[in-house]
Image: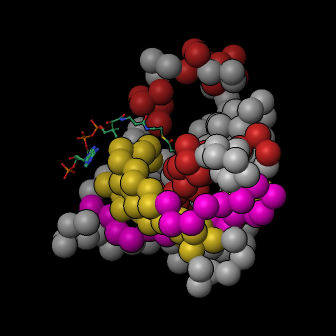
Amino acid sequence: MPDELDVLERHPKTSEPGELMRPHNMTCFGCGPESPHGLHLEMYAGEGFSVDAKMPVQQWMEGGPGVIHGGILSSAFDDVMGMTPRLIGPAAVTAHLQVDFLQPIPVGKTLHLHAEILGKQRRKIYVEGVAHLGDPDRPVARANGLFVQIDVRAHFADHVENSAKAAEYLGGKPQL
Ligand SMILES: CCCCCCCC(=O)SCCNC(=O)CCNC(=O)[C@H](O)C(C)(C)COP(=O)(O)OP(=O)(O)OC[C@H]1O[C@@H](n2cnc3c(N)ncnc32)[C@H](O)[C@@H]1OP(=O)(O)O
């Protein structure tokens, strides 16, 4: 992370601490309630510049016998960490994501995910993530990511016709 950082301020219209946050997109693999095969994460704004979510580790998420697949864990981090930019302003997309897998994560447990903005420079937002199984002092995974703020309309303009919600987006709704 660079030394010279911008001052962080919560966006006046962002969710209050404890409030459920709006999904990125209703069919987002991470947080979309209408995603047919998604994680269906519910994200809650935290204090400061943080977001929290809980994810029951279900059988279909299995990688090695009885434990979560690394890609599912990475997806969960990506989405929870990718929600933090909403706390300070425009949406941002993942440019870089790095995950440390510290412990096997068993099927049947509930994974607690916490993401926090470490700093921002211009459009770059540096975010860390941590996951545990109920005891915050015993993390089972950590992540670091760089998210870059975008102009949502311009960024998705060439792709929105491929969305499951294309008709609504092309009709001007819903807002991302
Ligand atoms: C609506 C939001 C949905 C969010 C869903 C949850 C999160 C996701 O899963 S997003 C999906 C996965 N991500 C993507 O598809 C993004 C694909 N990548 C891109 O579109 C582009 O590379 C993008 C937008 C990240 C950057 O491109 P662009 O807008 O041209 O910016 P660019 O000028 O290259 O970079 C901006 C800054 O970021 C830095 N940067 C960009 N990529 C990286 C990288 N991988 N590593 C380090 N720095 C980087 C640049 O150096 C530059 O820094 P500085 O301000 O110091 O000059």
Asked whether residue 116 is drawn in magenta, I would say: yes
What predominant SS class does the magenta segment belong to? strand
Q: Residue 21 vs residue 139: left or right?
A: right
Q: Is residue 82 visible?
A: yes
Residue 150, how many percent across, how many down? 39, 42
Asked whether residue 3 is drawn in magenta, I would say: no
The C terminus: image quadrant? top right
Q: Nearer the viewer, residue 17 or 59?
A: 59
Residue 162 found in image quarter: top right
The N terminus: image quadrant? bottom left
- Give the residues in magenta: 101-121
Q: Is residue 15 visible?
A: no
> Ligand 1 is in which quadrant of the figure?
top left
Residue 135's place in the image compared with 124, above or below, is below
Tell me which residue sits at (57%, 74%) in the image: 139
Tell me which residue sits at (47%, 36%) in the image: 152
Q: Residue furthest front?
A: 65
Tell me which residue sits at (63%, 71%) in the image: 132
